[in-house]
Image: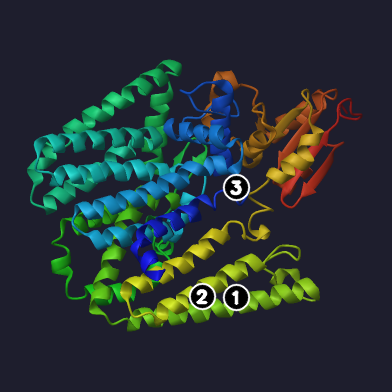
Amino acid sequence: MWTTIFKYRKYLAAGALTLVYLGSIWQRPLFRPDEFRYAEIAREMIASGDWILPHQLGMVYFEKPVLGHWLNALGELICGEVPMAVRLFPAVCTLLTALLIAVLCRRAGERQLGMIAPVIYLTCGLVFAVGTYGVLDAQFVLFLFGTVTAGYFAWSELNPRRRAGYLVLAGASCALAFLTKGFLALVLPTVLFVPFLIWQREWKRIFTLPWIPLLTAAILVVPWAVAVHHADGDFWRHFTVVEHFQRAIHGSSAGDDRSEPFWYFIPVLLGGTLPWLLFLPAMWAGCRNRFREIFQLPLIRFAACMTGVWFLLFSISSGKLATYILPCFPGVAIFFGYGLIRYAQINVFNRADRILEWLIRLILSLTIVVFLLQTAGKFTRKIPSELLLYGRNENYFIPILATVVMLIWFRMAQRERSGGTKFTYFCVGLCFVMLAVHGSMPKQFYADSIAPEQFIRELVAPQLDTETMLVSDVPLAAAAAWSLKRSDIDLFHKPGEFQYALERPENAGRFFTMEELATLIHREPERKIVVLTRSEERVRELPSPKRYTRQEDYFMVCYDANRKGAGQ
């Protein structure tokens, strides 16, 4: 049996990691703001039939091009309006990116690396977090990495026809990346290939390789580019000037400040590579005194440019979010995989075994403490709730069991003398926890701050009818629209990311300051008004008479129709 399993280990690994990703994306509610935003844009796209201009709350939303929203809409058409729909294509695209890493490594003649690097990529903490989260970064990374992979194929291909074919593929993938996130699809391949070709002493090819991909990308992008210009003549100005140059230089765009210091991505990169960062001493042992030899390999040079140059570019830009650095991780996975292969060739695993021993002891100690506290809190109720990770009625047995199973596999990895089998056992252990993490997340981490869907559907929805005016602050607006399946939600307090849309003449009257909202409430006592907010201070500022309901950090303030005293 074990011989058969070993024979088909590649397919078993692919199946297991696919299960981990696709089995994780349905287990928890949507998180605000990103998942609700992208889910609602796709829902409105389907409802309105407008597949050219993205809309949120019925207002144009020009932060991103259209392809990511098309994919989310396709996910909703396939799965229905459920959380899994907005996470389906991030998960699929992450898996396909891993497949491309394998293809790239094999093309470079690194067959063993082609088996290890994709697994490292899929089990990196940040990759798994973004790949099971409803944002557009995983889709962009797939198309971007497809661009540079096809470009690498073209660079290494001697046959002119095949080279031209790879360049066409690079251009097509670049077009998809552009339609997902914009001009980064052009900038990132450029700043990768220019230093790479100079490093390879083939700088003249800088002037010959780009033309076929650029022409192909232009042919594919132009139809939508023209259509969106005809649909709204201000799209390209806002998208280019505000969402690209202004965000890169100043860190902010219309009502949305993302400015961070230069060093912001250093801890993100280090933390995002866990657990593999822990094995950096082992990788160093494998590569020590061999760096000149290692960096003679074109694939390693390519990965170095991909990681180093892109990391520097992202760090220079003022606008930063943790997910922006995801394109660096294919290169990181290639580096880490190559380091582990070199370490395995030494055939002395003392460092790796010590790391595993330390990891097992630390995780086991924490697991025992959590289990004892949770059990005592559940059955004796003498443990303060502040010391409990899970609520008294939450199921904490599944994460404890998954952690114990992971530690068993880690222990098996520590005792194994074969480098390949040690790597396999470690990854199997990781898969158990990865599969359980979303469904076992303590509710205190999200229920009171970033997952308001239950609050809206159970408490807000019964208060509404077709004549009710619904007003929300920006943090809850997209969640309310998605949960209630309505886009006629007005905003108050601060415009936030809707600032540009609210300044347009067609959206006049969709936003109220606190004073304007109070005036409206007094002026229209015959109208029922419901206000949603996350701020207790704003609830106190709203005029009386009012009644409000609170659930955790969410507030619903109701002004009944034909209320008395409203005009006083």
Please state, as top left, top right, bottom left or bottom right, where the C terminus lies in the image: top right
Q: Is residue 113 above or below residue 527?
A: below
Q: Is residue 250 visible?
A: yes
Quarter of the rendering containing residue 35: top right
Q: Which residue is mark 3?
A: 31
Label 2 vs label 3: CA separation? 30 Å
* Left or right relative to 14: residue 530: right
Q: Which residue is mark 2?
A: 407
Kindly identify the residue that appears in the image at 20 percent across and 51 percent down: 107
Asked whether the residues under the numbered discs 2 and 1 touch, taking CB atoms below 8 Å apart as contact, a structural biologist would say yes
Q: How is the image coloured?
A: rainbow
Q: Which residue is mark 1?
A: 367
Disc 2 vs disc 3: which is toward the camera?
2
The secondary structure type at the circle numbered 3 is loop
Label 3 vs label 1: CA separation? 27 Å
* Left or right relative to 376: residue 426: left
Q: Is residue 11 above or below residue 93?
A: below
Kindly identify the residue that appears in the image at 17 percent across and 66 percent down: 294
Kindly identify the residue that appears in the image at 50 percent across and 32 percent down: 74
Foreground pick, 74 / 330: 74
The amino acid at mark 3 is Phe
Quarter of the rendering containing residue 391: bottom right
Instruction: Tell which circle, 2 or 1, labels the residue nearer the N-terminal end.
Output: 1
Instruction: Tell which circle, 3 or 1, labels the residue nearer the N-terminal end.
Output: 3
Label 1 crowding class (10 Å Cα cut-off): few <14, some 14-19, many 20+?
some
